[in-house]
Amino acid sequence: MHADLLFTGGAVLTPEGRTATTVAVTGDRVTAVGDDGVRELAGPRTEVVDLAGGLLLPGFQDAHVHPVPAGLELGQCDLTGTRTAEDTLAAVRAYALAHPEREWILGGGWSMEAFEGGTPTKELLDAVVPDRPVYLPNRDHHGAWVNSRALALAGITRDTPDPADGRIERDASGEPSGTLQEGAMELVGRLAPAATQADRLAALLHAQRALHALGITAWQDALVGGYLGLDDPSEAYRTAARDGSLTARVVGALWWDRERGAEQIPELVERRAALSHGRFRAGSVKLMLDGVAESGTAALLDPYLDGCGCATANRGTSFVDAARLPEYVTQLDALGFQCHFHALGDRAVRDALDAIEAARAANGPSDTRPHLAHLQVVHPDDVPRFARLGATANIQPLWAAHEPQMDELTIPFLGPERAAWQYPFGSLLRSGATLAAGSDWPVSSPDPLQGIHVAVNRVQPGGAGPVFLPGERVALAHALTAYTAGSAYVNHLDDTGRVSAGALADLVVLDRDPFAGAPEEIAGTRVRRTYVGGELVHTAD
């Protein structure tokens, strides 16, 4: 039988390494992998793709991403490219002037390091948008910047108490200053106009095109539900899966409402059945255990330090009761749900591992494949527990580098010992843990090649030393595996993540072989083509 597709003229990354030069695809499957002999499968209708010295590898998979909010932000006041207060304010002013018809100014993606203490004020926004409410989540989406008009509409005053799961930043006199952290975001976010179903579907398809262009063939949506004003992507996925416009393979992590307990589990079972269709499966549950280190809400075993290096009373925030978490995880595991944990601080990581251990003790071995995302601070005692418990380390490599947010807003408040425990990719790998990888887009770039660059170099693309914790660097082969086979494992997509006969033909063609160049040049690699099930979903040729 002749192949439908034949890739040749370059290197092929197989599970055994770069051991092949030619790959045949028939229908939606890889049918042969080898050398020049595979070319005999070419027939008169076979499309021959010249790799031109580049690399063919499995499609990338993003194990933690938010495509619908990202797609919506691309059409709103997108601040992801700004780095200074002046640039950020100029972008907000320009967007507001260009859109006088919009009742609210929405968008986000501003950098905390652009503002003193990471907390911009309402007065700055008032100066550029005095007449309309403004609601702009920051880059990590754990805080939001609002103007006086938005605070007034929400009725937030000096007398408004902080919600249990958040904080209203205040000035020296006690007045709300214009930044809302974590659960306090909802005080304003719930008032903002919601996107329509058509908006959300368009955002999903916009994001899908962007992800395919980066070689991404599958992902896990890390928040399928409603949270702090973010739009619930459920119906967008259901529509796209049923009408065939969802070309990627997607796992949805159903949101665990942290204000409730085990009584929501039957609802999650119903949602799993109602939403799963075609290329979308809602088989995971997202449990957000803590916040982020920059705002002092990541849950730590020991207190944060203050600006003088002295211990404070703050150990961060646990959004889910650690005493009840084992019960919840055990029940979810017994029902076949995967648990997808947001765990940044060492206390959150330990709580998640303790809950997985309890589920293993109660239910025995399972194939639910729990994973912990972010892993900014991991106590050394907990590193070997990942492999022992079968918990996958879901890493976001782009964050593991020196940058102002790390150097100014994180390291001083962790102290030198804990700062050295950050993003321990190498330690986890050496301990036997499985690594998966993702971006958390729109928090950071969804480009896997940029993430791989940082995982290998521990320096941002285009940056020059110092290297961030060089002992935690990983080899290029391991970084690529995390973004392919590792994430495929997390997503239960066992027919993907590898180039081998019988596997689904989810493939990406790179313009060069990054193994043949210097590690410092990895981020310069570009995607030429992306295939899902043998179908071309992106070409830059």
Image (cartoon, grey):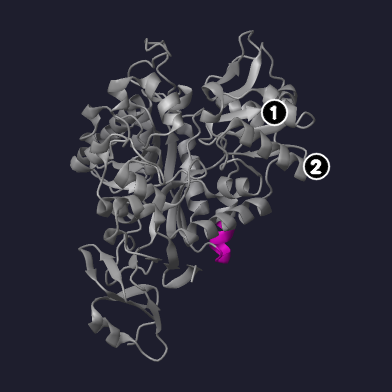
Which residue is located at x 34 percent, y 67 percent? 56
Find numbered disc 1 in the image and state the secondary structure of the residue it sits on. helix
Question: Is the stretch drawn in magenta largely helix, strand or loop?
Answer: helix
Q: Picture coordinates of residue 335 (x, y %)? A: 37, 44
Q: Picture coordinates of residue 215 (x, y %)? A: 43, 60
Identified by mark 1, the residue type is Leu
Which residue is located at x 42 percent, y 34 percent? 403
Q: Would you place residue 398 above or below residue 275 in this image? A: above
Q: Would you place residue 129 above or below residue 231 in this image? A: above
Which residue is located at x 63 percent, y 10 percent? 174
The answer to which image quadrant residue 2 occupies is bottom left
Q: Would you place residue 34 above or below residue 490 in this image? A: below
Nearer to me, 379 or 123: 123
Q: Is residue 234 magenta?
A: no
Circle 2 is placed at which residue position?
100
Identified by mark 2, the residue type is Pro
Instruction: Please provide the residue range marked out in magenta.
Output: 238-245
Nearer to me, 5 or 78: 78
Asked whether, in this view, residue 360 is left or right of residue 71, the answer is left
Circle 1 is placed at which residue position?
125
